[in-house]
Image (spheres, grey):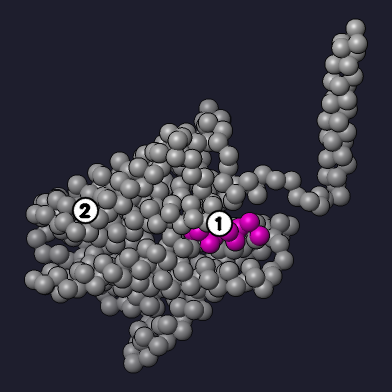
Amino acid sequence: MGAWFRNAKPYLLLLGVQFGSAGMFIFAMDAINKGMSHYIFIVYRNAIAAITLAPFAFFLERKIRPNMTPRVFLEIMALAFFEIILDQCFALLGMKLTSASFLSAVMNSAPSITFVLAVILRLEHMKIKEVSCQAKVIGTVVTFGGTLLMALYKGPAVSVVGSSTSHVGQPENVNDPTGSHWVIGTCFLLIGCAGFSAFYILQAITLRKYQAPMSLATWVCLIGALQSSVVALFAERHNRHAWSLGWDTRLFAPAYAGIVTSGVQYYIQGMVIKAMGPVIVTAFNPLRMIIVTALACIILSEKLYLGSIIGAIVVVAGLYLVVWGKSKEYKGGMPLSPAVQDEHQLPVTAPSNDSSDINKAQLVIHGDRKCDEETTLSKTES
């Protein structure tokens, strides 16, 4: 039971992350519908996340936190730009023009983009003759195909308990006959998806040099709050009241997103990325789509289309192919990705308390080898 839980722990953590992230989409859409600027929402979200994470990062990682270098700081600024500016800003802007469920559907193309980038940067091994590698490739293609199906084919609306004929969850201009807002919103979502994938790839690279996931998440949220503040000040320069909050989801949504989605989620994903690589993290995003779609239909009264249902089935099938291939890869003892290999290598300089143990272990190993050699030599002479 203990071994099973250790093996399943990363997957259970990622499952919990998807449920927490799904709630953020629902609360954010409701706050935006009540007049909150999505630029202001992003500023408050990341500021709250940084304030929440900072004490834990300072005390829990004070012994393992490496020194900040100019290169690491530049990578943190790039991480904040990819995740906060490209992903969050463009994703929420696209959600305003489409819907919360459509946002979660389009973001499912992230595993495909992440897998391709990981292969290019050699964060994932490509042995096409291996069954596990074939499963990951096929699963990635299937997932991307299901996402395209959801984006390009709507089909007839399906009546769901709790949903209504009027699409309360999205602006009225989304349903214009030309579909121009839907197309523009999809383009914004794809930009956000590209930033989302680039964030995970760069995070895996940065964690090799700065092996303190919670501190890294705190820095990303802090720098992201500053970067998004500049964008918000420019975008809302004619609306001074945009920064005001109310005692409703306009206050609860950024607080929830900052603590649960930005804070806890970044930390958990950082741990899983260090252990299993970035592809498996983004492979769980399709589950969030299903959760968001169900909640959006019930809470926000969004319409559910036949194309979304068919696409969701295809996407989930691709997801399980990727997860199955990844699990088979680890069970089969295939070489770990470079990001994981670095985590298992002994440091060049060990702490003074552990150096004697390491030297003793080396002496034991060399002694065993010497005994084996003497035994083999004696047998040969006899």
Residue 297 on image: x %, y %: 20, 55
> Is residue 123 in view from this perspective?
yes
Magenta region: which residues? 200-209
Q: Is residue 65 left or right of residue 187?
A: right
Q: Is residue 302 left or right of residue 27?
A: left
Provide the residue designation for mark 2: 149
Question: Magenta: predominant secondary structure element?
Answer: helix
As shown in the figure, which amino acid type bears the numbered disc 1?
Ala
> Of residues 115 and 300, which is closer to you in this image?
115
Q: Earlier in the sequence, mark 2 or mark 1?
A: 2
Residue 303 on image: x %, y %: 15, 58
Q: Is residue 64 above or below residue 188?
A: above
Q: Residue at x 38, y 82 (%)?
A: 244
Q: Residue at x 83, y 34 (%)?
A: 361
Q: Is residue 156 above or below residue 183?
A: above
Q: Residue at x 24, y 44 (%)?
A: 313
Provide the residue designation for mark 1: 204
In the rendered structure, does residue 208 fall within the stretch colored magenta? yes
> Of residues 187 and 47, which is closer to you in this image?
187
CB atoms of marks 2 and 1 within 8 Å: no
As shown in the figure, which amino acid type bears the numbered disc 2?
Leu
SS at circle 2:
helix
